[in-house]
Amino acid sequence: KLLFLPGFSTEDSVNEISGRGIGLDIVKTKITNLNGDITIDSLLNKGCKVTIRLPLSMSTIKTFVLLVNNQKYAIPVTSIKFVKNISPNEIFLRNGINCIIYEEHSIPVYYMSEVFGESKNSEKENQLTVIIIENQEKQAAYVIDKLLGDQEVFQKKLIPPILKIRNISGFTTLSTGEICLIINPFELIRNTVTELHINSSVMKQIPTDDNENN
């Protein structure tokens, strides 16, 4: 335990990279903040074993960080099938649903800002960035403002009083220190695609005035 005390060092003198006794102290502090633990077992003339324990509720995932209406979201890389830029003219209506062509098939497209209850960017752009997500046999495209890059993050579960947010699986802290919500891609595509198809079917069944007159 002495190794983790601040200021303790096995070096006789201080140099550019060691001797200040802050290395393992920082490691211990970081792991403790994650509700984890670190121990060292040592045998004379044989070496030592370092054991780090972290909660099972915490997992590291590789994500893409998205910008949507000045809000950052993270989404698991494994859920994204493709990222591409499209022209607004490539979006067309099919059975009352906005679609684009991908791999010679039409798939629904949504504005991510509207999915999260915000208004979409009113500024006209020559290109739109879309991410295409696949869940089993369903595919959908989502328009985002910008793709900021990939980042490996610790996924943390939501805690009381917020236990559930629609289309969100948890949150993380980015390397910049910002709190970022993590999108649940399976719930996202299930909610948007299924609900849109249901609403579209209901609208088709509503009679018009002309049909009533006939």
Image (cartoon, helix red, strand yellow):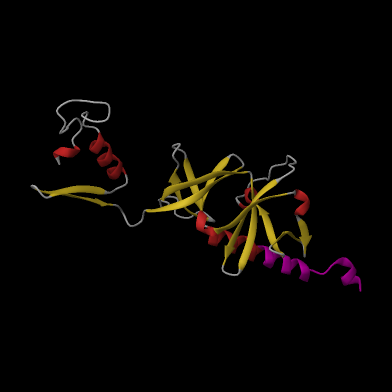
- What segment carries the magenta color? 196-214
Farthest front residue in view: 45
Q: Is residue 202 magenta?
A: yes
As drawn, the residue found furthest toward the left would be: 44
| Quadrant (top left/top right/bottom left/bottom right) for the N terminus | top left
161 and 154: which is toward the camera: 154
| Nearer-the-camera pick, 107 or 195 | 107
Instruction: Say if residue 93 shows up in the picture.
Output: yes
- Measuring 27% from the left and 26% from the top, which residue is drawn there? 16
Residue at 72%, 69% (x, y): give it. Answer: 201
Image position, residue 25 (x, y; %) = 24, 36
Residue depicted at 31% across the width and 54% down the height? 55
Q: Is residue 106 magenta?
A: no
Find residue 98 and report its horizontal and vertical position in percent.
73, 58
Q: Is residue 105 left or right of residue 27?
A: right
Query: Which quarter of the rendering shows the C terminus?
Result: bottom right
Tally of numbered tags: 0
Residue 155, given in percent of the width and then of the height, sits at 42, 51
Q: Residue at (74%, 49%) from the top-left corner?
A: 87
